[in-house]
Image (cartoon, rainbow, N blue to C red):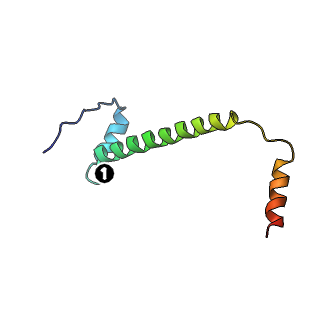
Amino acid sequence: MRYMCPTLSVRLPDQLKEGMDRLKDRVDWSDEIRRFIEKKIEDERKRAVLRDLETQITQLPKSPRGTSSRLVRGDRDSH
């Protein structure tokens, strides 16, 4: 069963369209554009996750001064 998909229309400069037409036997433009959009959506989703994570990190309480040194020293001494 095949489902109808929405159509996206884009206005292009004549020169760009002519270049696409010259390559239409070698390039599936619909597939290329679809993959580009999918990748862009995924990239933006990852950026949003990183922004959220950065916000959460900045809201964490600060460690007391010397905590890192104490933890590293403790780890080294345990071996």
- Residue located beneath label 1 in the image: 27
Which is more toward the observer, 23 or 30?
Answer: 30
Which is more toward the observer, 36 or 66?
Answer: 66
Q: Which structural element holds mark 1?
A: loop
Residue 70: percent from left, percent from top: 85, 54
Residue 12: image quadrant is top left
| Amino acid type indicated by mark 1 | Val
The relative height of residue 52 versus residue 75 in the rendered view (above or below) is: above
Residue 72: percent from left, percent from top: 81, 58
| Residue drawn at the location 74% of the way across and 36% of the way down | 61
Q: Residue furthest front?
A: 78
Q: In the rendered image, which quarter contains the N terminus?
A: top left
Q: Is residue 57 left or right of residue 74?
A: left
Residue 60: image quadrant is top right
The local crowd at label 1, few if under 14, some if 14 to 19, many if 20 or more residues have their Cα within 10 Å, is few
Residue 69: percent from left, percent from top: 85, 53
